[in-house]
Image (spheres, rainbow, N blue to C red):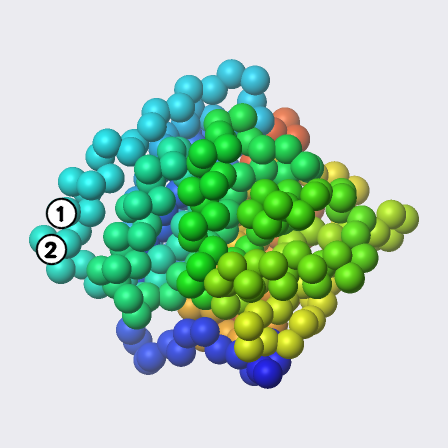
């Protein structure tokens, strides 16, 4: 089995700028999804090609928001990409607006079979599905597990994908093994299970394992508050480090630290509880990955 410290999922080739299809929603207010993925991956020297799955006035933690479903435009959008001969090095998917959108991601997989597949199965948190998610959409999201080079669920999303009952954030390693093994059995090549927190500790644990990868814990500092968009920031900064040529262990450790640093900055901003995670002044840390 491989160790995450020696596992490289992407080798950077000189001055070449890799292209990434970012299949996420776009929020007008409250930083998350494409509002996070585009700047973070761009700072890592990547060409980000957005495929918007829905448009939101603000993220779903606001009591009032407007959502526009973009499902109908995805086929002609991808037809145009195909006509232009677009080449992709990675396909990174997150929040989806409808179950039918999984077909667009599968199409990208067929048309770009060599592209790295990163699936952040954004469906819920704290044991609850997000308000725009239906059982049908969650089931469709599960179809993306098979073949995912990197799958980054939190405990809620892992429960939805596997059917294993959610037991809160304070779970033991036996539970973590059971969940990750189930996801690997469903076809995930590498799982990064996020957000395990033991009561009374100021540590947040992420676990990494896969079909050909040793089980490993990579922990970081736990701050005493929660913010919207940290999951998107974690997955985006993890992928940024991977596309910069870092091994998986270092990428997970970087993402954990980067999110924590951004949260410290965010809590100094007005209305920080809802505005989204503030990472802009830290983008130099992402760019430094290329050094």
Would residue 253 be found to the left or right of residue 168 on screen? left
Name the residue at 33% across, 79% down: 13
Where disc 1 sits, the SS reads helix
Tell me what residue is drawn at x 23 percent, y 32 percent: 72
Q: Please give the residue where the numbered disc 1 appears in the rendered image.
A: 80
Q: Nearer the viewer, residue 242 or 28?
A: 242
Residue that badge 2 annotates = 84
Q: How many marks?
A: 2
Q: Is residue 201 above or below residue 246?
A: above
Callouts 1 and 2 close, C-beta under 8 Å: yes
Measured along the vertical axis of the image, is residue 200 above or below residue 173? above
- Horizontal relation, residue 75 to residue 69: left or right: left
Asked whether 138 or 60 is in front, the reply is 138
Circle 2 packing at 10 Å, graded few (<14), some (14-19), many (20+), is few
x and y, in percent, of residue 279 in the image: 55, 48
Q: Nearer the viewer, residue 56 or 105?
A: 105
Q: Residue at x 35, y 57 (%)?
A: 91
Q: Quadrant of the N terminus?
A: bottom right
Q: CA distance from mark 1 to mark 2?
A: 6 Å
**Residue situated in front as seen by the camera: 151 or 281:** 151
Quarter of the rendering containing residue 51: top left
Q: Is residue 236 visible?
A: no
Q: Position of residue 223 (x, y in %)?
A: 76, 47
Q: Is residue 193 left or right of residue 38?
A: right
Horizontal and vertical percent position of residue 144: 43, 52
The answer to whether residue 152 is seen in the rendering is yes
Outermost residue, top side:
64
Q: Residue at x 14, y 54 (%)?
A: 82
Dot 2 falls on a residue whose secondary structure is helix
Give how far across and how far down residue 245 sits, in percent. Answer: 45, 75
């Amino acid at each position: 089995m491989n160790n995450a410290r020696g596992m490289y999922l992407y080798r950077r080739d000189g001055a070449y700028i890799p292209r990434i299809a970012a299949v996420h929603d776009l929020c007008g207010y409250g930083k998350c999804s494409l509002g996070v993925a585009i700047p973070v991956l761009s700072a890592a020297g990547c060409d980000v090609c957005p495929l918007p799955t829905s448009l939101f006035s603000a993220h779903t933690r606001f009591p009032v928001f407007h959502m526009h479903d973009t499902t109908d435009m995805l086929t002609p959008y991808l037809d145009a990409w195909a006509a232009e001969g677009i080449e992709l090095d990675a396909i990174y998917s997150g929040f989806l607006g409808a179950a039918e959108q999984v077909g667009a991601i599968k199409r990208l997989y067929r048309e770009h079979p060599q592209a790295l597949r990163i699936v952040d199965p954004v469906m819920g948190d704290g044991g609850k599905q997000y308000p725009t998610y239906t059982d049908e959409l969650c089931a469709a999201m599960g179809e993306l597990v098979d073949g995912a080079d990197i799958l980054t669920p939190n405990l809620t999303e892992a429960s939805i994908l596997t059917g294993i009952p959610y037991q809160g954030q304070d779970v033991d390693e036996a539970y973590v093994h059971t969940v990750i093994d189930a996801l690997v059995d469903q076809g995930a090549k590498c799982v990064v299970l996020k957000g395990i927190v033991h009561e009374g500790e100021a540590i947040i644990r992420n676990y990494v394992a896969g079909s050909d990868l040793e089980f490993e814990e990579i922990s970081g500092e736990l701050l005493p508050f929660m913010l919207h968009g940290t999951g998107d920031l974690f997955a985006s900064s993890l992928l940024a480090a991977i596309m910069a040529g870092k091994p998986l262990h270092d990428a997970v450790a970087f993402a954990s630290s980067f999110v924590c640093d951004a949260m410290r900055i965010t809590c100094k901003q007005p209305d920080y509880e809802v505005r989204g995670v503030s990472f802009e002044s830290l983008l130099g840390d992402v760019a430094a990955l290329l050094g």
